[in-house]
Image (spheres, coloured by chain):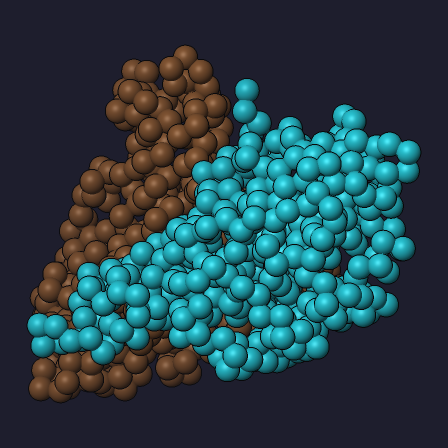
Chain colours: A brown, B cyan
Amino acid sequence: MDFGFSPEEEAFRAEVRAFIADHLPQRSGQDQMDAEEGMKNLPALYKWNQDLHAKRWVGFNWPREVGGGGGTISEQMILKEEMARVKAPMLGLSYMGLAWVGPALIKYGTPAQQERHIGPILRGEIQWCTGYSEPGAGSDLAALQCKAVRDGDDYVVNGQKIWTSLAMWAQWMILLVRTDPQAPKHLGITCLLVPMQTPGITVKPIKEMNGGAMFAEVFFEDVRVPAANRLGAEGQGWEVTKDALANERSSIADVWALKHRLEAIRDLARRCRRRGRPAIEDAAIRQRIARMETQVEAMRLNGLRFVTKQLRGEPLGAETSINKLIRARIEIESGRLARDIEGSFGALARKSPHAVDDGRWQKVMLSWPPFVIGGGTPNIQKNVIAERLLGLPHDG
Amino acid sequence: MDFGFTPEQDELRAQARRLLDHELPLDRILASSAAPPTLDRALWKRTAELGWAGLTIPEAHGGLGLCAVDLIVLLEEMGKTLCPLPLASTDLAVAALTALGDEAQRAEWLPRIASGDVVATVAILEASDVPAAEGIGARATARAGEVVLDGAKLFVPDGQHADLVLVAAREGAGVSLFAVPAAAPGVTATPLVVVDATKPAAEVRLAGAVLPERARLGSAGAAWPVLAHLLDRQAITHAAEMVGSADAALRLAVEYAKVRRQFGSPIGRFQGVKHRCAEMLCDIESARSLVYYAAWALDSAPEQVARYAAMAKALASEALDAAGEECVQIHGAIGYTWECHAHLFYKRGRQSYVWLGAPDEHYERVMGALEPRA
């Protein structure tokens, strides 16, 4: 065991810190729950993205040949950690493009597709959205029904997607469609890259329980997509996207976001009063804060064990579901704990007279579901853990 | 950055696994668990020859000179089979002798501990159940080159088997630590009847026990900071065993859930069972990460030990308490029969949860370090 870094890695850390000192935008420090606010400030973040891109720190883990940074696992870890430590904005602007589309393009894209899309993703010029889930295909994603029929050089798409985040802002969508209804469900799926302004696409924002709208329903009515926009072979769509989903980012940035939230909760507990005393002196509140602190530390250290496996060249499997489950618990508990620290004031939301911190924590309390449900609900994570890590039989 | 074990540590683990599976399978633990615990001295000697007892003893004193991370590898494996060998208490005594003893005291005891001839433990806690200097009521009175000890130490791990008990006693305004041979006049060890027979403990009474002055380890009244650190070390090594036990309890439940069929299907297919198993694994892996890191801190980052000892003990307590309980429940009615191993883990869990501080005390320590209470 060794938690130190090599001199080269420490030099890289120093380089990151120096960069941050010079380039970190003034308005920073937003909680990740406020991604919606972040989207509104997109233009202000372009400069940051340019500076990052010049260092090749956008798509830092991608190969240098396609314009990525070719960073080692340790360097990626250092970069993410240093950025998260100072609450820097995300490493790149094309969120979905960086998370799912780029990795899929790198592995399955034609040279022409890579040429066309990777640069704009790295430069933050193009927002992508992901057309995966459907009303009848959520946790059971492979049951998707949105269909595409080949017609000459085009596919004609009809159907509906839902829970498509950022669809209102995106110029492109990575879309999963069923091209072969006869094939076994995982093998009849194809992946298409679709410009959002194509005729026949309708985007309807979905208002969420916190009042915001990050997600949308997307309807397709005779939408023609050139066959040249197919990513991978026909019927290979599941493999193409499953690979990208497995390309899960490490949890380091999440851990730091949660650490910052914990600090904020401790600060809240110093200011709020219970039975006439600061809440931070209340035994029950102290237990809950310390428990959360312990869970966050466990998540950090679990992540380091998983990274060690990667560093040693061992395959990383379903272990990451463990941290997803822990993260879900912490996300949910943090809003609930803040509410309880506030006592009766916990009932007061944004814009109410007497609301604590203008209802910030009420928003947190109402905003965890996308983070907890998206990418696999806790119940799905438990299935994954039980089946792949413990060898228990598959459901159904 | 490497948060994993070396090939040597993996080999140590494999060796422990082989020996324990062969010498102390759970059936043998079960068979002996109805009677008051005894110490298999021949087996202890054999493991000592493999280097276990002297694992953390410097080579100059007959040990292997390894570190806490190596030790927890062994302890985790011992936890899996609920092995009752007194390795954790021995390590604690070694750490005390190393930290407080002078060269003569180390030379007197460490080689015999390493060889397995002397079983040693540390007696800190008392009936006050307060793990702080003010909780120590036993008294040491110095007189003309001698020291007289009076008092009662409780929850002494392996106290009934120990040949050497390191006793914490109040001396003047502080606390001192004394090397007390169990055979010395005025010293009696009475076994406690504990819930978990695989974790023996005793009360050690000192009634006017007269010791030579050189029995004192370190200067008079100055031992507490070291003892506080030892309590952290004990929490970490105990948590390492607990993680092993929790892991074994979960595996036992999972294997049963794969073969036990009801409603035409293995019960492990039902989410009521499989989701609980997944949650247990999640908690066990979290406790494991904290234990490993805390052990690393013992070797390499002393300033972090207290915080991570508290976190590791809290999570390991919760993980094993739940795993033992679920192991009984998932087995159904078989789970509460004597023949089923489930109750062994359940008992270890219920006992270890409060042993060396229940989670709430450790959470308060985690909080206290950040946020002193008014």
Task: Answer with left or right where residue A141 lies relative to residue A257.
Answer: left
Depth check: A108 or B360 in front?
B360
Query: What residue is shown at x 57% (from left), y 27% (from top)?
Result: B372
Q: Position of residue B186 (x, y in %)?
A: 70, 43
Q: Is residue A249 above or below residue B318?
A: below
Residue B34: quarter of image? bottom left
Residue shown at 32%/44% (left/top)?
A332
Query: How many labels sit on residues?
Result: 0
The residue most toward the top is A276
Q: Is residue B40 above or below residue A3?
A: below
On-image quarter of the N terminus of chain A: bottom right
Percent position (x, y) of residue A315? 47, 78
Residue B81 placement, left or right of A19: left
Q: Nearer the viewer, residue A342 or B303?
A: B303
Query: For the C terminus of chain A, which image quadrant?
Result: bottom left
Of residues B280 and A107, which is closer to you in this image?
Answer: B280
Q: Is residue A60 left or right of residue B188?
A: left
Q: Does the rendering let one see residue A325?
A: no
Q: Which residue lies at the image location 39% right of the left edge and 56% below the top edge?
A: B347
Tell me: residue A227, above or below residue B332. below
Residue at left offset 34%, top offset 41%: A333
Residue B40: name its quadrant.
bottom right
Residue B165, horizontal then vertical, whole percent:
69, 50
The foreground one among A327 and B102 is: B102
x then y, percent, for residue A340: 33, 28
Q: Is residue A221 visible?
A: yes
Please indicate whether residue A39 sits to the left or right of residue A261 in the image: left
Picture layout, residue B113 above or below residue A298: below
